[in-house]
Image: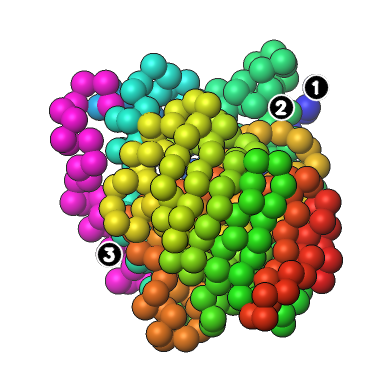
């Protein structure tokens, strides 16, 4: 049994890590996006931000049970409506160069059970369509961290009693977020340096495309000529360095949205705005997803992928090796922040301008109001880099780097 004082210590460390990861600056407006059940950590984050000199901390709390009522009873043609003040808030944060912190992890994993997946896929709140634009503008320093709740724990560890599950979730979150380090922030500086070393080796090869092949997958993804591989280390237009995702174990880049061909199978379930989609299978031709199926919840991802012209094309490719702390746990956490750092993944929707150098290539980056990551990697997935001469170079085998 975990000592409650240990969980209290981890809560304090996680709050400090969120504020450190976002690198909140004196006099800065800080926006926190949270969920019901995460209030205690949200208050700790606010305290840590104010200690660093925040001008004001604004916390918005989202409730999936209220969302359920909308999906069950609202008119079909209103489900993708977003109140303008939600978007205006985000755009104001961008305008004043604020800090943004999100506490992730499902607070109510069963809230959308029984809801028509096609209806659920039209409402991606609290994700806002302007998010990609704000991220690409590099005007805000931001960070996302997982925030454990009892309901989330029960979904991850159904074999344990509720209290034991909650304690186990905290133990795993502490492990993957490196809260066991004397200075978790410094521990992430060191880990990100390792990830950036892998990105540098990928950039040195300047591959024209990446081929992913293994059970249920044979997909070739073209890369934009000036695309660069990056790790979880960014700087705003003001030069404020920050780590957007904690944990992070990925090297990611922006693909050519018109050069994706083949088929791919997800290796983990996807939590999409409260819906769980499992057994995803997608076929691509000429960059566009021409067929989407799943064992569960297919209509949810189909609805998201049809929300605009760019939603059925790729905006991200990320490679994850086996050296991180998440994959070896062999757990599905039903939280994209964690699960996407357990395995290589791709994302339907908007791409990242900052991962592309050339101005002409930036114009080709996929544009969409959505960005939906789903995991396709495993140690059985082979990854090759395709040179501009058409040669295949092993990149990942059995989860280990080959370059």
Image location (x, y in percent) of residue 213: 69, 52
Coloring basis for residues: rainbow
Residue name at image x 59 percent, y 60 percent: 220
Question: In the rendered image, which residue does mark 2 sit on?
Answer: 167
In front of the other: 43 or 176 = 176
- Judged from the image, the secondary structure of the residue bearing numbered disc 2 is helix
Residue name at image x 78 percent, y 27 percent: 2
Q: Is residue 305 above or below residue 30?
A: above
Q: Is residue 318 visible?
A: yes
Taking the image as shown, residue 378 lies to the left or right of residue 269, namely: right
Q: Which residues are magenta?
A: 71-99
Question: In the rendered image, which residue does mark 1 sit on?
Answer: 1
| Image quadrant occupied by the C terminus | bottom right
Question: In the rendered image, which residue does mark 3 sit on?
Answer: 92
Residue name at image x 67 percent, y 75 percent: 390
Q: Quadrant of residue 27?
A: bottom left
In front of the other: 246 or 292 = 292
Sequence-wise first label, 2 or 1: 1
Mark 2, other Cα within 10 Å: few <14 / some 14–19 / many ≥20 = many
């Amino acid at each position: 049994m975990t000592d409650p004082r240990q969980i209290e210590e981890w809560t304090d460390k996680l709050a400090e890590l969120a504020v450190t990861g976002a690198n909140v600056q004196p006099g800065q407006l800080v926006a926190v996006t949270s969920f019901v059940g995460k209030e205690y950590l949200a208050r700790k984050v606010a305290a840590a931000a104010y200690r660093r000199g925040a001008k004001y901390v604004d916390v918005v709390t989202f409730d999936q049970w209220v969302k359920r009522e909308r999906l069950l009873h609202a008119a079909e043609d209103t489900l993708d409506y977003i109140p303008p003040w939600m978007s205006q808030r985000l755009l104001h944060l961008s305008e004043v160069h604020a800090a943004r912190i999100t506490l992730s992890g499902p607070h109510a994993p069963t809230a959308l059970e029984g809801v028509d997946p096609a209806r659920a896929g039209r409402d991606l709140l609290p994700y806002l369509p302007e998010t990609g634009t704000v991220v690409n503008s590099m005007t805000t320093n931001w960070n996302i961290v997982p925030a454990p709740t009892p309901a989330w724990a029960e979904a991850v560890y159904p074999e344990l009693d509720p209290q034991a599950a909650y304690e186990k979730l905290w133990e795993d979150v502490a492990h993957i977020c490196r809260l066991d380090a004397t200075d978790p922030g410094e521990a992430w500086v060191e880990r990100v340096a390792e990830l950036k070393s892998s990105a540098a080796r990928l950039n040195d090869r300047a591959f024209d495309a990446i081929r992913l092949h293994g059970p249920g997958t044979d997909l070739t993804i073209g890369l934009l000529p000036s695309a660069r591989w990056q790790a979880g280390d960014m700087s705003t237009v003001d030069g404020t360095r920050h780590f957007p995702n904690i944990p992070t174990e990925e090297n990611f880049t922006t693909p050519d949205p018109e050069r994706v061909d083949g088929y791919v199978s997800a290796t983990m379930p996807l939590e999409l705005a409260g819906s769980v989609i499992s057994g995803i299978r997608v076929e691509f031709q000429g960059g566009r997803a021409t067929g989407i199926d799943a064992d569960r919840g297919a209509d949810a991802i189909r609805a998201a992928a049809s929300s605009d012209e760019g939603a059925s094309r790729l905006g991200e490719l990320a490679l994850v090796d086996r050296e991180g702390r998440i994959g070896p746990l062999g757990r599905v956490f039903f939280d994209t922040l964690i699960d996407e750092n357990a395995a290589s993944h791709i994302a339907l929707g908007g791409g990242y301008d900052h991962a592309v150098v050339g101005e002409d290539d930036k114009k080709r980056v996929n544009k969409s109001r959505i960005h939906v990551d789903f995991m396709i990697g495993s140690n059985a997935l082979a990854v090759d880099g395709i040179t501009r001469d058409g040669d295949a170079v092993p990149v990942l085998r059995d989860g280990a780097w080959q370059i």
